[in-house]
Amino acid sequence: MSSSHSFLLVLVVALSSACEPPSPFVPPDFGEESLLRTATPLPRESYAGLEGNYLLSGDAHGFGQRVVLRGTRVGLSLFGNDNGAYANMRAGCSDGGTRLVLEGYWRHSTGSDAGLVRLFVEGEAIASALCAGTTVPSRASLRGNFTDNDDRDVGSSSTLSFDRPLVPGTERFHIIVHSGCRTVDDCGASENTIEAMRLVEGMGATGIELDVNLTADEVPILFHDDNFSSRLVRGRDCVGPVNEFTLAAVRELCAAKYGEAIPTLSDALSVIIDETLLTRVWLDVKQPEALASVMRAVEEAQLRAELATRDVRIVVGLPDLDSLETFVSLRGSRPIHCVYEIEPEQAVSAGCAMWGPRWTRGPSTDSVRALQSQGIEVVFWTIDETDFIDEILRSAGPNGIVTDRPGVVLQRLQEIGVLAPEFAL
């Protein structure tokens, strides 16, 4: 083969590979080696008996020494500070309810490292009580192994030793994950999709921020950019301004980066209410002209939440004065909550339930205290770096943080231990 032919062959292969759609992260699992296949699921009421702050020793693939174990809707998750590390595990009982195992996968949200984790609760008495659904104080120790994704051997032993309970009031601090999860972080789903919403509790989130755009036929959909492009979507003909596509065209021509459907706002809110334990939803509405349709969807979702006795509050994000004035004119006496992102005084005058300052303006401690004294929550956005998370927690004492690293915020919250007063929307 001539050198020119060789070059063309390499070029064709490279172009073919470049055109292949990206594939999301797929969590590893134990398969036939899973001990949970023959185990009885741990009663959900027993999750609280394992929650707490733990000291981690041994080879745990970069979690750091101080970690947090917390229950989710379907299992328990472990969160470290280093590398944005977290693990999602399910729990099961065997041997007549005397052995309790936690089993699942771990990953670094700041990179591609991932693998398997299997932990056993030490102490037959504690395991038996938890398996029986008895509420016991969190004093457990766990021992087991973290392995590489490519290495299914037992590996080095790791130990989680109970240190102290979760900081009182942890459940009322809003850890709001940004856009569900960023596609570039490869959490296993594209941002602003139904699939991402089902993952974020296992990443440490208690709330979610979603980006809302409007179609040509005035249907609010979840999408960040003003234009469809290969940055966030698949589809040869899915190119151009979002507001020039009808919902039917979006469904026919467009898919999220990993192939998921681009959801309507109404469908997304229904999933959050029916299928998650998330308690806050921040809607980042991209244009003032979308507010009327968004507010109708919010009213319907709030009624759905009330009927389901779900403690979930939806706040409409207002990034500028035009949006604020439009929202106030449309709201009237309707009980729709807003979060204003600019000046705190305008959040008060507009009757917003939340002020959302950008973290780069600093802790703004005086403004935070003034708004909290009036029953207005303060949630800073969007903070990912540990040093800045610590500074805002220590100096501002906010009611929440928007972040791409919800597990890190949870772990730092436990270390700092500072919580703002509780307010009900």
Image: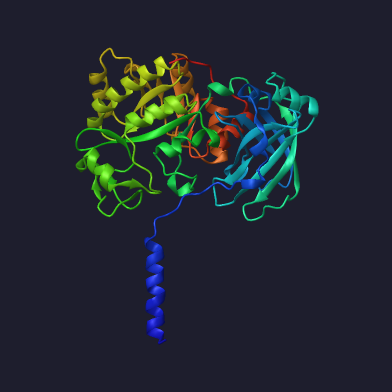
Q: Position of residue 250 (x, y in %)?
A: 26, 43
Q: How many marks?
A: 0
Task: Find residue 354 and report its image quarter.
Answer: top left
Lateral position of residue 46 relative to residue 380, left or right: right
Asked if one can make out residue 33 in the rendered structure from this viewpoint, the answer is yes
Q: Quadrant of the C terminus?
A: top left
Task: Find residue 220 and report its image quarter.
Answer: top left
Q: How is the image coloured?
A: rainbow
Q: Does residue 155 sit above or below 298 in this rendering?
A: below
Q: Does residue 374 sit above or below 410 in this rendering?
A: above
**Which residue sits at x=39%, y=59%?**
20
Q: Nearer the viewer, residue 176 or 361?
A: 176
Q: Quadrant of the N terminus?
A: bottom left
Q: Residue furthest bottom?
A: 2
Lateral position of residue 61 relative to residue 227, left or right: right
Q: Position of residue 254 (x, y in %)?
A: 30, 47
**Which residue sits at x=58%, y=46%?**
107
Q: Does residue 371 sit above or below 213 in this rendering?
A: above
Task: Find residue 119 and report its image quarter.
Answer: top right
Q: Position of residue 359 (x, y in %)?
A: 46, 34
Q: Position of residue 298 (x, y in %)?
A: 33, 23
**Which residue sits at x=48%, y=15%?**
423
Lateral position of residue 163 relative to residue 283, left or right: right
Asked if one can make out residue 419 in the rendered structure from this viewpoint, the answer is no
Lateral position of residue 235 relative to residue 279, left or right: left
